[in-house]
Amino acid sequence: MVTRTLAELAAELNGHLLGDGSMVIRDVAGIREALPGDITFIANSRYDAYLDETKASAVICARDTRQTAVPLILVDNPYLAFQQAVRIFRPDRDRPEPGVHPTAVVAEDASLGRDVSIGAWCVIESGARVGDRAVIMAFGYVGPRAELGADTCLYPRVTVREDCVIGARCILHPGVVVGADGFGFALDQGRYHKVPQVGNVVIDDDVEIGANTTIDRATTHSTRIGEGSKIDNLVQIGHNVVIGKHCIIVAQVGISGSTEVADHVTLGGQAGLVGHIRIGKGAMVGAQSGVTKSVPADTVVTGYPAVPHGLWKRLQALLQKLPQMLQRLRDVEERVQKLEHEDAEERVR
Amino acid sequence: MVTRTLAELAAELNGHLLGDGSMVIRDVAGIREALPGDITFIANSRYDAYLDETKASAVICARDTRQTAVPLILVDNPYLAFQQAVRIFRPDRDRPEPGVHPTAVVAEDASLGRDVSIGAWCVIESGARVGDRAVIMAFGYVGPRAELGADTCLYPRVTVREDCVIGARCILHPGVVVGADGFGFALDQGRYHKVPQVGNVVIDDDVEIGANTTIDRATTHSTRIGEGSKIDNLVQIGHNVVIGKHCIIVAQVGISGSTEVADHVTLGGQAGLVGHIRIGKGAMVGAQSGVTKSVPADTVVTGYPAVPHGLWKRLQALLQKLPQMLQRLRDVEERVQKLEHEDAEERVR
Amino acid sequence: MVTRTLAELAAELNGHLLGDGSMVIRDVAGIREALPGDITFIANSRYDAYLDETKASAVICARDTRQTAVPLILVDNPYLAFQQAVRIFRPDRDRPEPGVHPTAVVAEDASLGRDVSIGAWCVIESGARVGDRAVIMAFGYVGPRAELGADTCLYPRVTVREDCVIGARCILHPGVVVGADGFGFALDQGRYHKVPQVGNVVIDDDVEIGANTTIDRATTHSTRIGEGSKIDNLVQIGHNVVIGKHCIIVAQVGISGSTEVADHVTLGGQAGLVGHIRIGKGAMVGAQSGVTKSVPADTVVTGYPAVPHGLWKRLQALLQKLPQMLQRLRDVEERVQKLEHEDAEERVR
């Protein structure tokens, strides 16, 4: 079991300690669940009230946090420092040993790097290439000529179809499907004819893909996911979509064919993007929004159809005022009627 | 083949028979598809018109149903009674025999209860525990130290990752992923750094989870699903979410991290909940709604952002009136202009 | 490597050639990625501007396309002709050879047609029937008494549960689950009791189903998918749903129990349909729409709740006018107040 004094921990996290440095920390925890012996964190000053309630022995906080009864480690980026603390107290204990499980079916002409770990019941097809130290857990499927980079990890039950390419240090969670056919059909005389999807998927380094997410292969050329992008569970990415670097795509997002998402974009959960549009660099799309046209860089859009977030908020506020507007309209109609009536009387006199 | 007379069936279902008790029933069916020899049901008086059309030999109905040509069994809870009827006429014939399939890979230190059934190509990892009479069908994966309660059934292709705990009498459908990593990344200098997800998932007794649904493990501590809750297909449940007892979560719902759902909540299909909120006991969220803040107990909310259902209906009705409101506004503007004009003329005179 | 002269290709595609028939074409590509030697296509005159930019050696276009510098093949249906071109230049090279992989577990009383191909780690249960030339790739699961038609292809990791029936020439992508239990529970004294789902799923010929899509079995009788319908990824189809022929169902759509979708319907991505309604022949539902009541044939509906598309567009336009309406309301109120004031003064005089 790993332990650290608070002073040691503050040094490792490049933090400034407020409190007793000799205190012993034995684990990490969320602020509500933490118990004595745990260190926790607050990444958002909105939750500062928890500082007075937590049972944690210490809290990792932003530099400007006020002093409290509980010892603090003040850092530049509390969530980042917490991440480091988790790695200290909870080293990964389930990383499989290198080796090929005797039940794995590996094609003779597949190429396996040094120290790969291939689990039970895996299938590595002809011409596939697996990089050094890559891990493929149980039921992994790597199709003909597909490639996995070094140190990439496929959790159990990942499917990578033929000719798809995955970079280094990627993490694919259970049930991910990379390279299923894009959804393309030509209509002729009332019947749909399949357009063969002969492209592939290319995923750059350091990408993480959540459970049961699907990324379709391109009709021709490649569907692409840029370096460092993180994709949550149950996301659908259509054929010929291009995702930039360091994007965040939250669960159940759907992106239609040929849409481009530039670098550093965030897509909120369940958002939907139509095909053939472009989301500019640094843009953010609100959860559940429906994006029907291109979004400029550094813009936040919300709603269906998605509009700039400020406009959306104004429209939402006005919507809440509709009952009041209708009443005011009725009132003014009555007042006008009264004026008209008096006017008529005046004329009669 | 199972048969019952209508009199026998009425007795078994604690119902009151209206009609010929000697009639022989041989199967169950939906009211539209039912044929002579079948018994069917109506759970909602909205569908009473079907009573005159159905070809069924008898119908299970609420106690206050009017007499009709077709024989009726009147009960307190028709859907519940129909459920019992299905169990009578269609006993499960595919429950696998106890035993471990020769192709299953079971770790030496895994613990298997009495009369478990483990199917082809299953993987039971080190330290896993499987309760008595549990069924794990083909391609099941039970990770290191994961636990399954007694009589729990995993349909083919279920993934339960390390350290997750599943109670007794649970049913997990194909493609379910329990315990994939939560979606947590710390942003530092334009790159996202993975926050290790070292918690687990704890699922209580009598929970059912639909096909390809994903339930993420907690960052620390546990993502929890309460006793008796029923979750449909393709649902996403984020890290550290806590679901209460006897909830209904319809297909494609998404629940963001750390949100709490109290007991007896119903979430409609495709609804989305932001993180760190609380849905009160007995609340209902409409289909496709986007819930952006906590919901009090026993409240029905709808829309995006979700508001109380009554308010939402009023706003929807007002929206439909917008064309008319605009016209009334134009009219009153004209009338005011006319008054102003006359007023000016008056002054001139 | 396949090559064709442009003249040969024009003849094969029943097209009219504008340009040099001796030019040699070696591959297909999208219009933005195409290079010399490639043929590409434009299916929508909206993209005609690309004709002046593309590096392709030739473009397949509609008959009325204006002449350009790049050679054109003019056809009736460019997308259909492109589909034929893809089949010419990219013949399928990964179709598995007939045969049963030695690791497949096939029940003794399962029936396999001629020239079937059954991959590694497949499970074919008792009484299952697999049609001639059907392909079941790695990890396929065909449950007791399930049937697959001739020439149907199951990509890796498809689950077909007991008694489900799939027609000829169907394509099921990885992670598809056919026949999981419908979501039916009877509430009694605060607990939900499972209603056994004893029906099946029946899928007609020429249906394609996208990755990780789930189609639930009926409570009784059948959930049905009609001939030639195409279903994208991560779609949820509830119990007793009936889908007609030649429908298009885009990714992440959800269809609740017992709803009927007639022939030639298109459902946009992430749309949701409540249960027990009917979508008429040829109707279209916009992306993300929430359909709460039946839709007549040949109608386009949009929004939540979904209304006819024209009405939805008018309401959206009016919503944008709300700030202006509020201002006009304020103005008219002021004018009325002024009139009332003058009126009062008048009376005083």
Image (cartoon, coloured by chain):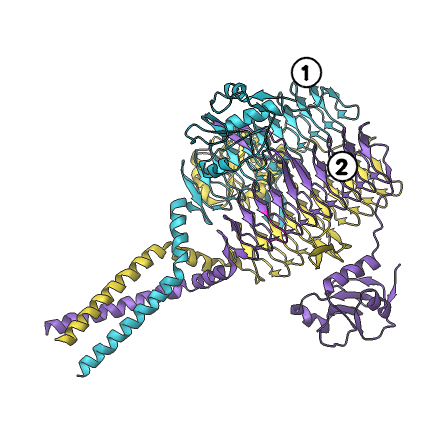
Chain colours: A purple, B yellow, C cyan
Q: Residue at x 63, y 30 (%)?
A: A198
Q: Nearer the viewer, residue A308 or A236?
A: A308
The x and y percentages for residue A28 are: 79, 62
- Which element carries disc 2, helix, strand or loop? loop
Between marks 2 and 1 in the image, the one whose residue lies nearer the viewer: 2
Q: Look at mark 1 in the image and give the residue it sits on.
A: C114
Q: Is residue B3 above or below residue B150?
A: above
- Magenta residues, as a range? A261-266
The x and y percentages for residue B239 are: 70, 54
Q: Is residue A18 above or below residue A190?
A: below
Q: Quadrant of residue C40?
A: top right
Classify residue C210 as left or right of residue A67. left
Q: Main secondary structure of the magenta part?
A: loop
Q: Nearer the viewer, residue C194 or A180?
A: A180
Classify residue B9 as left or right of residue A335. right
**Amino acid tagged 1:** Arg
Where residue C295 is drawn, which disc sits there? none
